[in-house]
Image (tube, coloured by chain):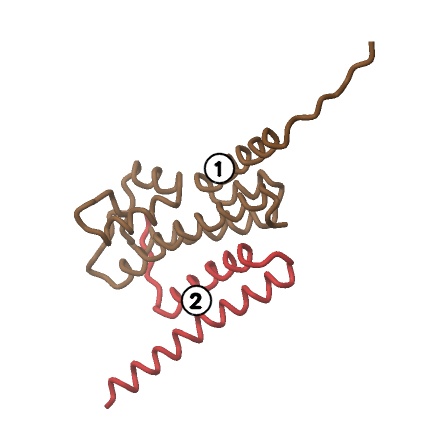
Chain colours: A red, B brown
């Protein structure tokens, strides 16, 4: 199996992308709702990680 | 002589429906997205197939670890359940010898999480396909 090295952000983005697609498909019924919920999950994944990253950075500075 | 059509009792029909739904769930567990194909949800099935397999392959490529059954460590056991949820992908990878893991790199740790998450998401989709087969969801 060839090995792959990604940046932390790239790994997070891929994880968020695939998980969001699955969440959208399984947790909503209408296609429009699925797309909207998938996008919401994707933004929450990325936004949550960025907020947590900044929080840890600020806590570490003190 | 006129033939008379005798309708099956409701309980028999329900049992058949449940049996079919269980087949859909097991198929969906073994092969990602296959449960959706059985209930004729082609787009959902294709998306699930691509996403789960991509996550699993990325996890292996990032040198993630596939857990084995280890009853002594609860976290290992939970990881194994997560990996096992990937169905045939898990058994094929174990048979080929992939998923040895590299615990000394951060990427290996991320890969392990990708593998477990792929399995758990696969279980979620198999359950969803079962619900569709039962008529609980459109």
**Residue B107 location in percent, x, y?**
29, 61
**Considering depth in this image, is A22 or B10 the residue closer to the camera?**
B10
Q: Secondary structure at mark 1?
A: helix
Residue at point 43%, 66% (across, down): A13
Image-based side of B27 in relation to A1, left or right: right
B78 vs A50: above or below: above
- What chain does badge 2 belong to? A
Q: Which residue, given by chain and number where applicable, does mark 2 sit on?
A: A13
Q: CA distance from mark 1 to mark 2?
A: 29 Å
Badge 2: few (under 14), some or many (20 or more) residues near its Cα, within 10 Å? Answer: some
Q: Looking at the image, is B83 positioned above or below residue A33?
A: above
- Mark 1 nearby-residue class (10 Å; few <14, some 14–19, many ≥20): many
The label nearer to you, 1 versus 2, is: 1
Q: How many marks?
A: 2
Residue at the spot 31% in from the left edge and 60% down from the top edge? B110
Q: Position of residue A49 (x, y in %)?
A: 39, 74
Outermost residue toward the left? B72
Query: SS class of the residue under badge 2?
Result: helix
Residue A4 placement, left or right of B27:
left
Residue B8 picture location, percent across and down: 66, 26
Q: Which residue is mark 1?
A: B27
Q: Are marks 1 and 2 in contact (CB under 8 Å)?
A: no
Is B88 placed above or below B6 here? below
Q: Residue furthest bottom?
A: A62
């Amino acid at each position: 199996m060839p090995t792959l090295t990604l940046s932390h952000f790239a790994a997070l983005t891929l994880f968020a992308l695939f998980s969001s697609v699955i969440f959208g498909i399984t947790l909503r019924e209408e296609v429009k709702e699925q797309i909207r919920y998938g996008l919401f999950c994707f933004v929450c994944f990325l936004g949550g990680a960025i907020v947590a990253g900044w929080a840890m950075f600020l806590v570490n500075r003190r | 002589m006129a033939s008379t059509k005798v309708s099956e009792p409701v309980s028999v029909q329900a049992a058949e429906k449940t049996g079919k739904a269980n087949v859909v769930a097991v198929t969906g567990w073994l092969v990602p997205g296959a449960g959706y194909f059985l209930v004729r949800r082609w787009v959902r099935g294709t998306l699930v197939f691509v996403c789960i397999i991509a996550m699993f392959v990325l996890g292996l490529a990032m040198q993630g670890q596939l857990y084995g059954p280890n009853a002594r460590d609860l976290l290992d056991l939970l990881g194994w359940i997560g990996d096992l949820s990937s169905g045939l992908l898990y058994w094929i990878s174990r048979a080929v010898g992939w998923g040895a893991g590299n615990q000394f790199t951060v990427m290996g740790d991320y890969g392990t999480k990708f593998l477990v998450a792929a399995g758990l998401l696969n279980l979620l989709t198999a359950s969803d396909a079962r619900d569709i087969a039962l008529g609980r969801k459109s």
